[in-house]
Image: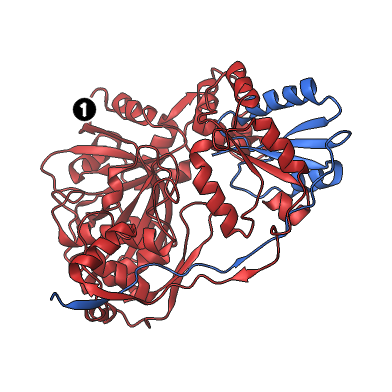
Amino acid sequence: MPERITVLNPMGFAPKVTRREPAPRLPTLDGRTVYLVDCRFDDSDVFLGQMQAWFARHLPGVRTVVKPISSVYLKDDPATWEEIQARGHAAIVGVGH
Amino acid sequence: MTIEARYGVPTVALHTDKFDRVVRAVAAQNGMAELRQAFVPQPVMGKTARELRAYVDGKDPITKRPVMQEVIEGLTRPVGADEGSPVEYDRSTPRLVAPDTEENLHRLFLESHWTDTLPIVLPTEERVAAMLAATRRRPDEVVGHMRPTHFRESWEYTVEKVAVNAVMAGAAPRYFPVILALAATGVSARGSSSSSLATMAVVNGPVRDEIEMNSGTGALGPYNHANATIGRAYGLLSQNLQGGSVPGLTYMGSMGNNYAYNSVTFAENQERSPWEPFHVQHGFKPNDSAVSVFTGCRSTAFTLGLREKYWREHVRNLLRGLDPHTPPVLLLDPITAWQFVDRGGFLKKDALIDWLYETATMAAGEYWDYQLVQNYIYPRATFGEEPWASQLKAAPDELIPMFRREDIHVVVVGGETNGYWRIMGSTYQTTTSVDDWR
């Protein structure tokens, strides 16, 4: 019978996770402003332009605003988030990978 | 997640399908496992407006439902009773693995993605204790925090955890202060970027001789135990102490990178260099021992020596071959380092770096059109960050610097069997004391 040995676990220590409350959803998008947030990565602006066109064709009652983030996606952008909070009702962020 | 959780705005995040597992894991780690997400095919990059319209009109490749249906429902479907309850939970890591045979433990380590798939040394208590004896630091002392990429959570690790990974890599205990210093940088050698980056680690000072590192012939190759196992330990500790490096989940490098096997770890050949050692450039004394870390190692250009007539043009051609997002780090055999002194009169390393900065130029229109410049530099330029904001004003055919001067570096390494030299495209991160970890 081969000997059983004890070894140490090589993994680090994960942080605790605290669940966060999602924002309440909207009953409808009609008459609301939806921000299409361009994360400025890999031609996401072209993609969001097509999504904006889709809204215009299919849901003309929805106002859309394409909003590029201020800098690179690696940086927090409170000015943009505050604008969306103040002037928008919902956000679509893309295109991440 | 920030807009949703901190600003209370209902949000849908759009991703490409290859990142399905990654983004769900990241959302869960941020306490928002139920974050509304929708997916489109990869790639978005380089597609025409017409092709991207087809993505918008098409189906989510993960759920097989229309993309826009996912998006609209994501913003309007009420949050379920099981979503968002503020629960906190712990994810502890046991100190020991359940006792088993050596064969079964090797299989467990491999199947758990705790290795680089090459055979490892099992970290028994005796071996780990021997490693810990090589530092005055307490085993339970926290060394730092690390994560595979910007948006992921940072994991914490202690001196003992670093020792476990050092044993696995086959490192000798006397290498341990260098390995601890690498861990203390907090810079991961297992970055998750789809660009398949690797790190480079350059050791300076007396520790090089104390542990018999190689800075001469074959320094960047598999010919020296310290170079090989310190570099391997850096990779293993990164993947395990940051919470993993598993393709499709915590590693997304599309092609992968062979440099990652030992993180291009070597000692600088200070004795044969015409210039001050790298760590002295960064605030250390010559008798200090330190390790410097570079990230983003992907591209390499090389040539032999510096020819009398066209050496300037040849160097410029090498520089122009790099992607302008990733700056040049010249790795010079001493023969070529001295040729730069003889040909260019660069008695100081700074003078050489000045010349490299002035030589590496590109037409502005060409520069701004690079995809990585578009992704990472153009947004910063439009945000007003210099020097890029000013360079953005250049006419399309005006020559502008490819790199910031402070991002260009020079390291001397090699055994003078010839004057081959190379440029490693990589980004300097930090230099850390080894002596602090003895």
Q: In which quarter of the image is residue B80?
A: bottom right
The C terminus of chain B lies in which quarter of the figure? bottom left
- Where does residue B58 sit, x and y in percent of width and height? 61, 25
- In the figure, the shade used to draw chain A is blue
* Residue named by callout 1: B307
Q: In which quarter of the image is residue B436?
A: bottom left
Q: Residue at x 69, y 25 (%)?
A: A49
Location of residue B127 with respect to A34 vertically, above or below: below
Outermost residue on the left side: it is B417
Q: Chain B colour?
A: red
Residue at figure coordinates x 19%, y 70% from the top left: B102
Q: In this view, does B282 lie above or below A40?
A: below
Residue B366 visible in rendering: yes
Tell me, yes or no, if residue B288 can be seen here: no
Residue A52 horizontal side relative to residue B349, left or right:
right
Closest to the observer: B210 or A4?
A4
Residue B390 coordinates in the image, percent (x, y): 63, 33
